[in-house]
Amino acid sequence: MPGTGTGTGNGAVTRSTLRQQIADALRDEVLAGRLQPGQEFTVKEIAEQYGVSATPVREALVDLSAQGLLDADQHRGFRVHEYSLDDYRGMIEARSLVTDSIFRGLMDETVTTTRAARAALATRTDDPRTVAALAGVRRRGEEAQRAAAAGDLNILIGYDLRFWRELGGLVGNSYLADFLHRLRVQSWVCAVQHLRRVEDLRGRLWADHTALVDALARRDAEAAHAIVTAYHAHALALIERLTAD
């Protein structure tokens, strides 16, 4: 992680960028399992680890707390949030609702005057720009599938988050896309604590990313819904089995 430096750039921008870099790095530490659920640390410890001042670290930790990844303790610093199986079930349910909304937005043909609906219409799957964007999303899906087949959790998480972020962005509603991204990060944080106990994950992780993109490209809402429903059922069943072991 780079320090604050003494460059000539705007100080506020530099601090904001550093704040995001620290938040991203700590999120990745949690996803990689190097920061375990319940693990505690202070602003000072993180600042010393990355060789930066306390202010951007504190801001980054507050951001991660707002995202539900950390818990703040006024007297002891911060700790990694501990999600339960019930939390995961709630995330899966919420993801289902959000993805259904995204699919409706991509395929909505109803003429309306609302800004959100106009954005959805502008990015329908028959628009050349959307076709090109879906091709890019499909490439992320191909990488995610390869990682899932190999059981490489670190690579899978990175491509999977990017896949869903870009797919959600096609609707043109940044609030919806951001909410789905946050849900997916939380879902992975909850799941990795169990998945990393499995010695060999090959063939055990969902890998139908491209099938989903193909269903959306041909405007098959029923098939897309079925694929995601099966995905959520698979993910929940896997975590339920692992928590029972």
Image (cartoon, helix red, strand yellow):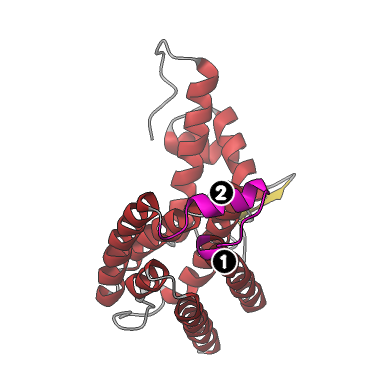
Is residue 144 visible in the rendered image? The answer is yes
Q: Which residue is mark 2?
A: 119
Q: Residue at x 57, y 66 (%)?
A: 104
Q: Residue at x 54, y 86 (%)?
A: 240
Q: Nearer the viewer, residue 227 or 191?
A: 227
Q: Residue furthest top?
A: 8
Q: Is residue 124 magenta?
A: yes
**Residue at (64%, 56%) from the top-left corner?**
68
Q: Name the residue carrying label 1.
A: 104
SS under mark 2: helix
Query: How many numbered discs sit on the rendered protein?
Result: 2
* Residue 187 position in % (x across, y down): 54, 67
Q: Residue 79: in sight, yes or no?
A: no
In the picture, which quadrant includes the N terminus?
Answer: top left
Looking at the picture, tell me which residue is in the foreground, 147 or 43. 147
| Residue 165 image point, x, y percent | 46, 55
Q: Which residues are magenta?
A: 106-126
Q: Position of residue 231 (x, y in %)?
A: 46, 79
Q: Work out whether mark 1 precedes mark 2 in sequence or the reverse, and give the earlier one.
A: 1
* Secondary structure of the residue carrying numbered label 1: helix
